[in-house]
Amino acid sequence: MLAGGGAIAAPLTPRAAQTPESSPAPPTADPTPDPNPRSGLLSRAQSALRAERYSEAEALWLELAHQWPDSAEISYSLGLTFHRQFKIEAAAEAYITATVLNPNHREAQINLSLARIQLGQLEEALLPLAHVLALPDRPSSPASIHTLAHYNQAVIFGRQSKLEEARQEVDKALAITPSFEQARELIELIR
């Protein structure tokens, strides 16, 4: 599940749930040109991503990243667009760029961890999670950022056959967000 409109927590199985997003407003014809071309491009990229028009969103986020290479948020959104198209290596690279530009970008760190899990880079996937857990927690839907970090650590430990560590991480996730369904499912898998 992609956090903050963004993080995917990785289950032990290939299934990955995504947080529901609201439908975009229908496009309107505005005869006045936008005085800030970036805001128009940004709005179109966000709308395309929300509407799951990923090829269009990718082209728009790439253009934005070219124009504003120092924006962690644009790099993160590009990563999210790649991730949703299952372009995992490209997603990881975009998340890395976002975390270099803003090391405290929690969602980029969580999604970088997920991408590394999906690429089989389990040890490397732990590093961004440690960083997230060193930051203050932040609520997100369906679970807080720390909940997602503990959940992803549980997935990693489960894949490494470290079942006791996996159980401990799931317990930590559920202690923060008792209603987090994916953690409840995971605890049943590792018992």
Image (tube, grey):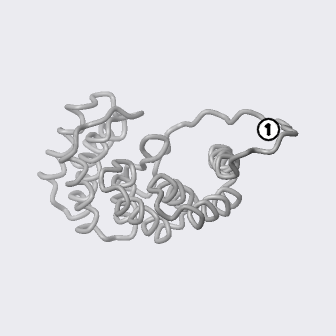
User: Where on the picture, by quarter, is residue 177?
Assistant: top left
At x 70%, y 51%, the residue is 37
At x 27%, y 28%, the residue is 178
User: Residue 132, percent across and down?
Assistant: 25, 49
Image quarter (top left, top right, bottom left or bottom right) of the C terminus = top left
Label 1 SS: loop
Give the number of marks: 1
Instruction: Determine which residue is flagged by label 1.
Output: 27
Would you say 10 lies left or right of 149 here? Answer: right
Would you say 74 lies left or right of 33 here? Answer: left
User: Residue 94, percent across and down?
Assistant: 46, 65
Residue 1, visible in the rendered structure: no
Q: Is residue 138 placed above or below 112 in the rendered structure?
A: above
Would you say 95 lies left or right of 171 here? Answer: right
How packed mark 1 is, by other alpha carbons closer than 10 Å (few <14, some 14-19, many 20 or more), is few
User: Residue 76, percent across and down?
Assistant: 47, 55
Residue 148, visible in the rendered structure: yes
